[in-house]
Image: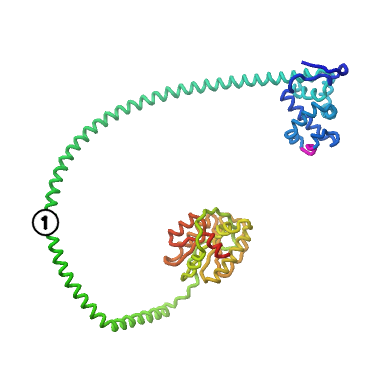
Amino acid sequence: MVETHGGEPGDGTAEVLDRPLPDGVRRRVVQIVSDGFGGLTLGELPAQLRQYARFAPNRRAKFAGNAMAAAVETDPLFRQRIGEKLREAQPELAGALDAASPPPAADPLDVAAAAYVLRPHGWVKLVTAAGEEAQRADAERADEESRAELERLQEELARAREHTRTETERLRAELDAAKKESESLHRKLRSALSDVKRGEAALRKVRAEMDAVRAEGHAQVSAADSESRRLKTRLGEAEAALEATRKAAREGRSVEDMRVRLLLDTLLDATQGLRRELALPPVSVRPAETVDAVEPGRMTPKDIAARALSENDPAILDQLLALPQAHLVVDGYNVTKTGYPQMPLEKQRLRLLGQLSQLAAQTGAEMTCVFDGAELVAPVLLAPPRGVRVLFSKPGVTADELIRQLVRAEPPGRPVIVVSTDREVADGVARAGARPVASAVLLKRLS
């Protein structure tokens, strides 16, 4: 329906749309405004749209759609400027609308949107017709979807009926099999009852035999009591003889001490002679150096995830490192990511190794620092500090597994301390005989 509010004959600006603008037409209008938006200066834009002047057309249509639609509706000058941009972009469509003969092959929504912006005579009819066409298309599409859904439901019903029939036949077959199995179980039950009766008879016989054995046992216990009293008497005599022997041994103890000392000196001299005879070289290789790993300069580290252990007193670490031949194995990235994760990996390594070098100089303990190198793609240029062995795990081997190899390589009885907050690593090395220590303990000791 068209309402007019005055105006010149043949001018569509006096026409007013008496219903909301259809959604499809509104989206096309917003797109036309967004496309023509960029050709206007900042002063030609309404005040509420100037903040979107630098936006791309698609982004402008997304965030300023409502504002642009409202401006076209309420600001005739802005609508006229957008209409001029539309005439420049689509002169054929604009000319056809001015001549009141829209192209038959054109999209009704595009025609209605252009008519809404250009406002030729009869534009309200074009917009209304486009809205009705869109509603009719939506209704047809909904009808097609309903028919498709009905067909799908009918197919599902047919499949459900077929499944029900198949399931019923299967259950009947299972019921027949259950009946046959029940008959078989009844037969087995009757046979089992007969076996129970025979077992009860055998049990009565066994009980009679047990009574006879108990009587015989009582007789043997009596005999054993008599023998025990006799042995206690002999034990008293033996204890008296032993006390006499101890007294005699105390009197001759100085002679025995001299003989033991002479034997010990003989063993020491024999040991020294054996060392000279074998000419064994001094120990230059430690067990940790036999584990297959990658030394610095060949691979790069990978972050490892840590699982928390409870923190302990740092004094315990000093006591452990004071043990003879102590070996401290450090899970490198586990410690650095616990203490200073914000630093780059290279600086984490350098800081930890420098502190471990100082600790090695203070305690004299053997120290090995292990880093995860499973995914290194370039060499790590790193000079190990004095007193600290630095190892990277090989490709396909995690630092956790390399630590377990180092622990297994040590001889039983040697004190090995493993620093890691990883619960799996701590449990594994503890089972292998090593002492796990939380990373926080080492960090406190180093600080």
* Dominant secondary-structure state across the stretch colored magenta: loop
Q: Residue at x 45, y 24 (%)?
A: 163
| Residue 8 placement: quadrant | top right
Disc 1 marks which residue? Answer: 219
Q: Residue at x 85, y 28 (%)?
A: 77
Q: The residue tagged with tag 1: helix, strand or loop?
A: helix
Residue 334 position, x and y percent, is 55, 57
Q: Residue at x 25, y 82 (%)?
A: 251
Q: Is residue 90 above or below residue 280?
A: above
- Label 1 CA crowd tier, 10 Å (few <14, some 14–19, many 20+): few
Magenta residues? 51-55
Compare residues 151 and 212 and report the one nearer the observer: 212
Left or right of 372, for residue 49: right
Compare residues 362 and 158 and report the one nearer the observer: 362
Residue 414 position, x and y percent, is 44, 67
Quarter of the image with the N terminus is: top right
Residue 138 position, x and y percent, is 66, 21
